[in-house]
Image: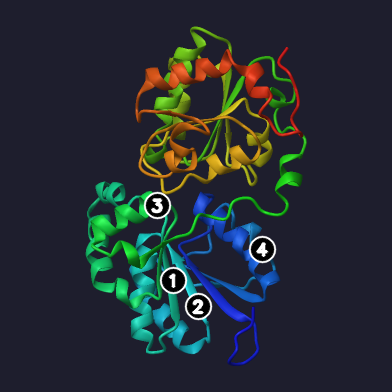
Amino acid sequence: MQNPDDAKPIAVAFYMHDFAGGGVERMRLTLFDALPSRGMSVTAIVHSRNGALAGMVPPSVPVINLGNRRTAADIVPLARLLRQRRFDIVVSNLDHNNIVLLIANLLSGRRTRVIVSQHNALSAEMRAGWKYRLVPLFYRLLWRAADAVVAVSEGVADDLARVAAIPRSAITVIYNPVVSGDYAARAAVPPPHPWLARPQAPVFLFAGRLTAQKDPQTLVLAFARLLRRSPARLIILGEGELAGRLQQMARDLGIAQAVCFAGFQRDPLPWIARATALVLSSRFEGLGNVIIEALACGVPVIATDCPFGPAEILQGGRLGRLVPVGDVDALAAAMHEHVHQRAAAELRRAPYSGRRYA
């Protein structure tokens, strides 16, 4: 893809907070790899060059570190950067970054094309504090300054339109890029844990940030109830402020020997590909990339029917099991059902798995 004005590759910049190990950041890395082969040059602009994925940025992608302590402090240096550099398009994600980019672009005086994308349910995020409650107001004031407003799911788009008073027709839904060209090779990597290499019991997997949004406490409680009825194991991938509390919960419930806290993994795909089922216990989502990853591996999915994403991906429960948010009994029952239907589940798995339980 060429810029018709000067026959040079289209210069695309991505404005991000940092390189934390979340789904949004992983999705951006996927684009960093894919866009250059489509005739685009890519630059990363970050509030802070920190995060678990910082080392995974391709060497060909320059990183401009604004290095400020607060996101709002990015406005002036970002406006200066947009005035000095000839970016054809700048893309941002997440609420505060979107607001900062829109203001900076207006201040720059250059009118760079700007795409802002919403990756989570704005109505749910507003409960996190006053800083999020101001976001809808800024969206109402500034959305017309964007060349495109993108949401990662139909549910997020509907929510954004309702909460921020943006016409629904002005919001474009673009699902996250999840399945890359190297997907099969990554999934075929040898099992990263002995529970997955020679499973003596069903292995359930959670992958995500250990935060209140993901509600891993409900998962741990449900798994404890499952163990009263059936042998099983649980692997939890991810880091976050709830990690210590979850480990203490496992000890208090007497299930620590059946739960593995594997921490952050640069590539969770080999883990997902060999799990009995992926379990997502979120209170809210934007899309739920990990569900798509599991489905692409043929791995069954159990997810909460939260706003928004899981039901949309799972087609209302046709492609996976949906349970009510925060319902320990329902989640335990769904996991128990998978334990006793694992032979049928094996038939749905991808060809690079192909093992049977002892």
Label 4 sits on residue = 33
Residue type at mark 3 is Glu
Mark 1 or mark 3, whichever is nearer to me: 3
Circle 1 is placed at which residue position? 115
Q: Is there a contact, CB below 8 Å, between mark 2 and mark 1? A: yes
Give how far across and how far down residue 7 sits, in percent.
65, 89
Residue pictured at 60% horizontal, 89% vertical:
4
Between the residue at mark 4 and the residue at mark 3, the CA separation in whole angstroms equals 26 Å
As displayed, is residue 275 above or below residue 139? above
Nearer to me, 220 or 253: 220
Q: Which residue is mark 2?
A: 89
Q: Secondary structure at mark 2?
A: strand
Q: In the image, is 78 to the left or to the right of 262?
A: left
Mark closer to the chain start, 1 or 3: 1
Query: In which quadrant will I find the C terminus?
Result: top right
Q: Nearer the viewer, residue 44 or 184?
A: 184
Q: In the rendered image, which quarter contains the N terminus?
A: bottom right
Give the mark nearest the N terminus, 4 or 1: 4
**Which residue type carries mark 2?**
Ile
The residue sitting at 30% across, 46% down in the picture is: 124
Q: Residues within 10 Å of mark 1 (few under 14, many from 20)?
A: many
Separation of marks 4 and 1 at Cα, in angstroms:
19 Å
Figure quadrant of residue 277: top right
Q: In terms of secondary structure, where does tag 4 sit?
A: helix
Residue located 68% across and 23% down the image: 346
Question: What amino acid is found at the position of numbered circle 4 in the picture?
Answer: Asp
Q: Closer to the N terminus: mark 3 or mark 2? A: 2
Q: Nearer the viewer, mark 3 or mark 2?
A: 3
